[in-house]
Image (cartoon, rainbow, N blue to C red):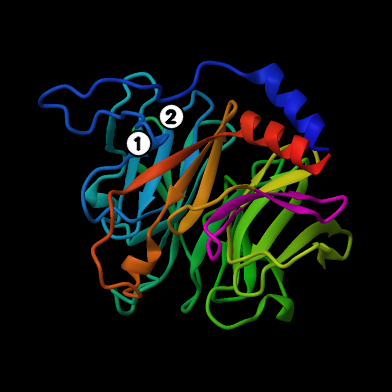
Amino acid sequence: MIRTLIGMLALGIGQAAFASAETGPGDPFLVRLTENNEVPLPGTEFYPEGIAVSREGDLYVGSLAQNEVWKLDRQTRKIERFSSAEAGLHSVIGIHVAHDQRTLHACSSDPKGAFPGSRSELVTFDLQTGTVVRRASLPPGGLCNDIAETDDGTILLTDSFGARIFSIASDETELTVWSESMDFVGEGFGLNGIANLNGSIFAVKYNSGELFRFSKTDQGVIHERVALQRPLQGPDGLEPLNDGTLLVVEGYSGSVSVIDISTGSVEVLAGGLDSPTTAAIHEEFVYVVQGQLDHFFGMTQTPPGPFGLKRVNLHQVLAALSQRVE
């Protein structure tokens, strides 16, 4: 399976997004790839969490502390605010660019309780203008965490505190429970990353390290646990690799791994990351958010380091992994 994925990537290799560029005077947020393969993010209070990528390669990153979505433009290599203050966002967690490239969906939530009485929302923006075109609230106590899209354009989102997944179609204004189970109940953050892999929906459970597969039947949506060779270590972001494998960000271990659905194997691709949360894939590169959440939630009293995205060459690390497993 690893060799198959390497071959697919080799056919699709193109010019890297956000290649090295010089930072000029008066342009402090020009996106520049550092020697450590990191894309810097502005400021000392960014605390990134969610990330999404458009078909053209523009990256969108949500901020937990600044309550905004920022855009990293592939062509200009500049970073600028995508959402305005009028959007009324709280902490931005999961974000998703719709397959039709018309809208961007963002989970606006309050994981630290900074906005008493507020409700978590799925906020939808026009991708071209940044204008809010829809708001859909979760029930009280829910927490919108991550977002995926079905083949027919229906948006799915995980509720980490409510042990359920909601759905909303493009012509709907309210969320509908898509799947709910006691299997998703647990202490702290439950359901987290969600992804569509070749028409099948998968979601991870953060507090238990489990992976679930969902199927739609005449009786409704059913789910099953995917047998894994080991529990996932604080699984967060989940991305499809379109060959029977999933990319998962493991926050506890500070790593990015590949799950082979057919065998249950979990192979680490990159480690040593600083509280990674989510990832986006464009061409042969994976852009991993380093959220430094231990600082955001007060578990570490020292100041956070510079914020940024770690860029991983998926083709290179998979080739190295293939040699290692032979």
**Spatial separation of the CA atoms under disc 2 and disc 1:** 7 Å
The 10 Å Cα crowd at callout 1, few under 14, some 14 to 19, many 20 or more, is many
On residue 71, the disc is 1
Give x and y (percent) for residue 62. 38, 50
Give x and y (percent) for residue 276. 48, 55
Magenta segment: does it hold 178? no
The 10 Å Cα crowd at callout 2, few under 14, some 14 to 19, many 20 or more, is some
Q: Which residue is drawn at the image coordinates 30% and 42% (left, top)? A: 41
Left or right: where 269 falls relative to 300 = right
User: Tag 2's secondary structure?
Assistant: loop
* Residues drawn in magenta: 249-268
**Looking at the image, do the residues carrying marks 2 and 1 touch, with CB atoms under 8 Å apart?**
yes
Q: Which residue corresponds to mark 2?
A: 58
Quarter of the figure with residue 121: bottom left
Q: Is residue 80 above or below residue 229?
A: above
Q: Which residue is drawn at the image coordinates 49% and 45% (left, top)? A: 288
Give x and y (percent) for residue 147. 56, 53
Left or right: where 323 falls relative to 96 = right
Q: Is residue 152 above or below residue 119?
A: above
Q: Is residue 8 visible?
A: yes
Left or right: where 146 falls relative to 125 = right
Give the amino acid at mark 2. Answer: Asp
